[in-house]
Amino acid sequence: MKQYMKKFVYIIIVLLCLSGSVYAQSFLHVQGQDIVNENGQKVYFQGVGLGNWLLPEGYMWKFGGYGDRPRTIERLVADHLGKEQADRFFKTYRQNYITEADIKRISELGFNSVRPALNARRFLTEGDDNQFVDEGFQLLDNLIKWCKKYHLYVIIDMHAAPGGQTGANIDDSQNDKCELFSDPKNEELLVKLWVKIAGRYKDEPTVAAYDLLNEPIPECTGADKLYKDSLIPVYERLIKAIRAVDKKHMFTLEGYNWAGNWSVFTRPLDPNLFFQFHYYCWSRPDNLSDINYYLHKRDQLNAPVWVGETGEKNNAIYFATTQLFEQNNIGWSFWPWKKMDTRNTPYSIKPPEGWDKVIAYSEAGKDVAKDPEKIFNQFLENIKIENCDFFPDVVNSMLRRLPLKIEAENYGQEGYMKSYFVKDTLTKSSFYRIMEPVKIVLIKNDSTSLASEQAITLSDHEWTSYRVKSVENKKYNMAVKVKAVGKPASVTLFVNGKPAGIRISNTEWMELNLKPQRFLQGENKIKIYVKNGNIEFDWINVYK
């Protein structure tokens, strides 16, 4: 048992070293296009978003329109339990959803930061007599205390500002309008709340940055025409007010239209500030969204860039996006840490028995579920991390860490003669990485699946390479899915330069098992090289 515990502690230390989070408790600041600690060491954020905790979102509960945002979810629960019991339910919910066990686990897995999504209503009452709410601050205090203990940074995210900055369910809007910008009182309340937060944590280095507004002012509703010119003045006012009480912490600013339009940014508004966009790849067939716009703006602004949200897709996309970000010096935060009945987050909450009836009520607003107290009590137990389902493949994909299935199309991002060699560099791929010349073919595009299935085509002397990480020096089993095109082909697979030959004669897809190969602690390189013939290549699986 002692030997096992020593090995476990060793692996955790390696994970923390790989993520750069061992000595996390130091104030961070901007230095050119990097974020560094007080010793001048670069800190690269790879974290998770704590969505659905202080700001429940209906889609994470599988709810319809009658329970699409915090205030309607609260109404739905009250319809089932009564107002008094519903209030007790939500207090327990907030205590159970994110606990010290969650934070410990996030650190153990190799992440180095969290982004808690705040709802202003949990910290400041609505209506005419606005008072601070102790519960919200106590929950945030606990989170920061746990993150300090487990060496994680906290980026505090104002996900739902007073009045709403987005005018949608994600900011708990009352009237589906951006009333933060239309009602001066809401702006006053936002300033008041941020000054309170900054005054409370001004001397806490575990807090890395203040994310002043999540995804403000969408274009799809026409809100940009009304309010986009108000965004910079609001940011400037917030920064000035916070700087009066807190001189140390960084800010992160999001563009309008779901954080993505940075046209309003012509200069940093503070010397200690980085810019943020959100990155989701929801195209079918799967495709990687272009980030060149943000790279050009980074050079213009000469400030760091961070992806505050990415995820909600599949393992192939997770591997590709974090690889793309790392290659371009862009930290990231995966969204979200957990939600209900899913397969594409680190943890999944089991629906309690009878939850389908609650879902039906959320869609129609009638016929409350039978025995609701039993259902909601079970839900409060199911949200605890020890009762959730864990998906290590999701985590390993975003951290590109073994054991891992590597999709052929996710070759490295270092470019020609470094991550790939093909003879025709003028013809670009029709799918997925459409600005590059490695030919990617679509095998299957089932809209009911999390992922479309794609492969690459290689001919004689062409190759692709892949970089993966291992927390220890050990041998792994390996398999490849491949087929010959036209005639038999000879292929060599290299692991850190050590070759293993493969003869492919089957023109139908086949899974070939290879001899176990040794991987080194840290980064490893896998290369597939076609000696002669033509192949289609789907994936490499590296497994225990």
Image: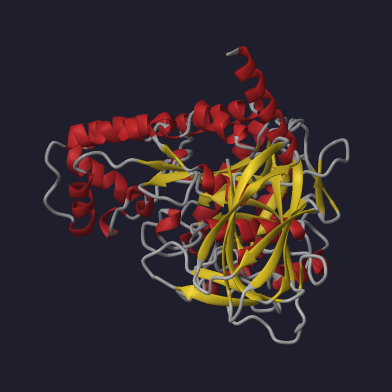
Q: Is 68 situated left or right of 368 in this image?
A: right
Q: Residue at x 69, y 66 (%)?
A: 491
Q: Residue at x 61, y 70 (%)?
A: 289
Instruction: Determine whether 135 is above or below 483 in the image.
Output: above
Residue extending furthest bottom? 426
Q: Nearer the viewer, residue 334 or 127?
A: 334
Q: Nearer the viewer, residue 71 or 515?
A: 515
Q: Nearer the viewer, residue 141 or 522?
A: 522
Residue 49, position as x, y percentages in the image:
55, 46
Q: Is 302 situated left or right of 8 in this image?
A: right
Q: Nearer the viewer, residue 213 or 426?
A: 426
Q: Residue at x 80, y 72 (%)?
A: 416
Q: Please identify the quadrant where the C terminus is shown.
A: top right
Instruction: Determine whether 344 is above or below 220 in the image.
Output: above
Instruction: Determine whether 410 is above or below 40 in the image.
Output: below
Residue 268: quarter of image: bottom right
Residue 190, position as x, y percentages in the image:
55, 49
Residue extending furthest top? 2
Instruction: Determine whether 377 is above or below 449 in the image.
Output: above
Residue 422, position as x, y percentages in the image:
75, 77
Q: Please identify the quadrant where the N terminus is shown.
A: top right
Residue extending furthest right? 40
